[in-house]
Image (spheres, rainbow, N blue to C red):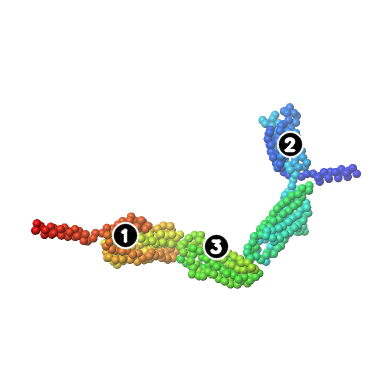
């Protein structure tokens, strides 16, 4: 009888024993302290040198209020209300070291550590797809979990599920089917709704549970996924293009819903491309039907990272109008691009004067260009300096200035014909650039209007001309005066 009572008392003490966590430890000297949660442990003093035992006097505080003062030898400990435990691992007096110290630890009751791992089998679902969810529950703590209640909700509302689970031992994961060799998590299947537009769903799982002492804890977990809209629109084009060549843009519509849709599709090529096509279409799409349209575009000039605007499709579902947008393709266009500018030193000149012509060729593309040009000299002008023709290579971002001079003799207007500049890439693709026609007025004015040279910015000058009869008037006036004077002298 007494043996049975002793066994029951021993079993009761074992069951009710507190399990402590790993806690924290520190080597403390006089007046030093360490903190764990709301608790603070201060090393106040050591036993006298003449004492046979080495003890450390410690003070335990909570929120700056003293809870206990204890003298501890190495290996001794104390606890308060099963809420905190203090242990002296080692005590060294000053007769053994230059400065006494104590190795102390503080421990709190071990708590369950539950992790909730919620996952879906896809990141994006189509309307009508099966959504498969799995919830793994793991207790990574050192005490068991009891009376677990679990809630799963979503925003926007799609799921509202609840489970109750019993004891989950420390270091174990919840197993829905203990008859298999693997661990089976909680599983839940949902149907993806048909939506007019894509929607992101945020799922949150919340668990409440107790430890063996009846203390309550909480844990959270979650995941997210997207359900695509009923109408899907994609815009595709070759991302690497050669300047001067045409490429097809393809817009594809797919009705992934469960209703027929009347769709209006519009598109745009943006500021970096051009097309001759009308970019608006209308058609009906039955469920699961696809429709593709295409058109040809040309890049206006080479460049990297050129962005095409997204295509847009609108439709009515119920009483509401919806719009969906495609991707915005990014394109790299490779090739040379010669920009030609021509200027003259004067727009009005006197006969026999020279006019300077400046031709500037700049490669604003991203590939080398081999350039050939030949300017036409008007028949009533003559070349007096420089050369109006040439062939050379221009690197990307660089330019060349070509200057030559002509002399004009005939009064009237002389026209420099529009110039054509031919160039080719290192791959052999051919291109051309041009400059507009320029007119030069040749007149016998006193002053000729001189225009600055662009881009070399030649100084502005004025050409001065003499009137052919200017000195003759002076001589005639003097002769007339002498004749009058002689006539009146005969009668004096």
Q: CA distance from mark 3 to mark 1?
A: 52 Å
Helix, strand, or loop for circle 1?
loop
- Residue 111 vertical placement versus 465 (above, below): above
Asked whether the residues under the numbered discs 3 and 1 touch, taking CB atoms below 8 Å apart as contact, a structural biologist would say: no
Q: Secondary structure at mark 2?
A: strand
Marks 2 and 3 sit apart, C-alpha to C-alpha, by 67 Å
**Gap between marks 2 and 1, in whole Å?**
101 Å
Tag 3: Cα neighbours inside 10 Å, few (<14), some, or many (≥20)?
some
Mark 3 = which residue?
328
Using the image as rendered, state which of residue 214 and residue 144 is in the foreground: 214
The earlier-in-sequence mark between 2 and 1 is 2
Q: Where is residue 340? Give x, y as percent.
A: 39, 62
The numbered dot on residue 66 is 2
Using the rendered view, name the quadrant where residue 414 is placed.
bottom left
Residue 403 shows in this picture: no
Q: Pointer 2 and pointer 1: residues touching (CB < 8 Å)? A: no
């Amino acid at each position: 009888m007494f043996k049975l009572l002793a066994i029951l008392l021993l079993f009761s003490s074992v069951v009710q024993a507190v399990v402590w966590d790993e806690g924290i430890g520190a080597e403390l000297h006089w007046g030093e302290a360490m903190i764990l949660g709301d608790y603070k442990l201060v090393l106040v003093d050591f036993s006298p040198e003449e004492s046979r035992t080495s003890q450390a006097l410690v003070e335990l505080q909570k929120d700056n209020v003293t809870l206990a003062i204890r003298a501890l030898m190495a290996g001794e400990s104390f606890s308060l209300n099963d809420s905190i435990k203090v242990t002296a691992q080692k005590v060294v007096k000053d007769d053994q070291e230059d400065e006494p110290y104590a190795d102390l630890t503080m421990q709190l009751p071990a708590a369950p550590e539950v992790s909730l791992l919620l996952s879906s089998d896809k990141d994006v679902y189509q309307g009508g797809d099966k959504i498969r969810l799995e919830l793994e529950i793991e207790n990574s703590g050192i005490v068991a979990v009891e009376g677990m209640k679990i809630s799963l909700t979503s925003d926007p509302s799609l799921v509202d599920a609840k489970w109750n689970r019993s004891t989950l031992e420390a270091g174990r994961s919840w197993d829905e089917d203990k008859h298999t060799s693997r661990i089976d998590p909680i599983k839940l299947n949902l149907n993806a709704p048909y939506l007019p537009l894509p929607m992101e769903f945020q799922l949150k799982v919340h668990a409440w549970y107790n430890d063996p002492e009846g203390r309550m804890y909480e844990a959270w977990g979650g995941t997210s996924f997207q359900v695509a809209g009923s109408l899907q629109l994609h815009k595709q084009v070759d991302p690497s293009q050669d300047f001067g060549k045409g490429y097809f843009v393809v817009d594809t519509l797919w009705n992934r819903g469960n209703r027929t849709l009347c769709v209006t599709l519009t598109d745009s090529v943006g500021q970096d491309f051009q097309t001759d096509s009308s970019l608006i279409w209308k058609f009906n799409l039955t469920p699961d039907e696809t429709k593709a349209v295409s058109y040809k575009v040309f890049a206006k000039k080479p460049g990297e990272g050129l962005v095409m605007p997204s295509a847009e499709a609108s439709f009515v579902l119920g009483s509401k109008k919806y719009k969906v947008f495609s991707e915005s393709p990014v394109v790299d266009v490779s090739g040379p691009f010669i920009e030609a500018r021509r200027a003259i030193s004067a727009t009005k000149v006197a006969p026999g004067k020279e006019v300077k012509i400046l031709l500037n060729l700049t490669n604003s593309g991203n590939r080398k260009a081999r350039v050939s040009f030949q300017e036409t000299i008007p028949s009533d002008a003559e070349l007096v300096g420089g050369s109006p023709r040439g062939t050379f290579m221009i690197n990307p971002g660089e330019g060349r200035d070509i200057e030559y001079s002509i002399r004009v003799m005939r009064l009237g207007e002389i026209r420099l014909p529009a110039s054509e500049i031919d160039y080719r890439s290192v791959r052999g693709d051919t291109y051309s650039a041009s400059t507009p026609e320029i007119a030069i007025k040749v007149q016998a004015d006193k002053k000729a209007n001189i225009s600055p040279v662009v881009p070399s910015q030649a100084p502005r000058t004025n050409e001065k001309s003499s009137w052919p009869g200017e000195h003759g008037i002076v001589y005639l006036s003097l002769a007339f005066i002498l004749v009058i004077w002689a006539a009146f002298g005969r009668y004096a």
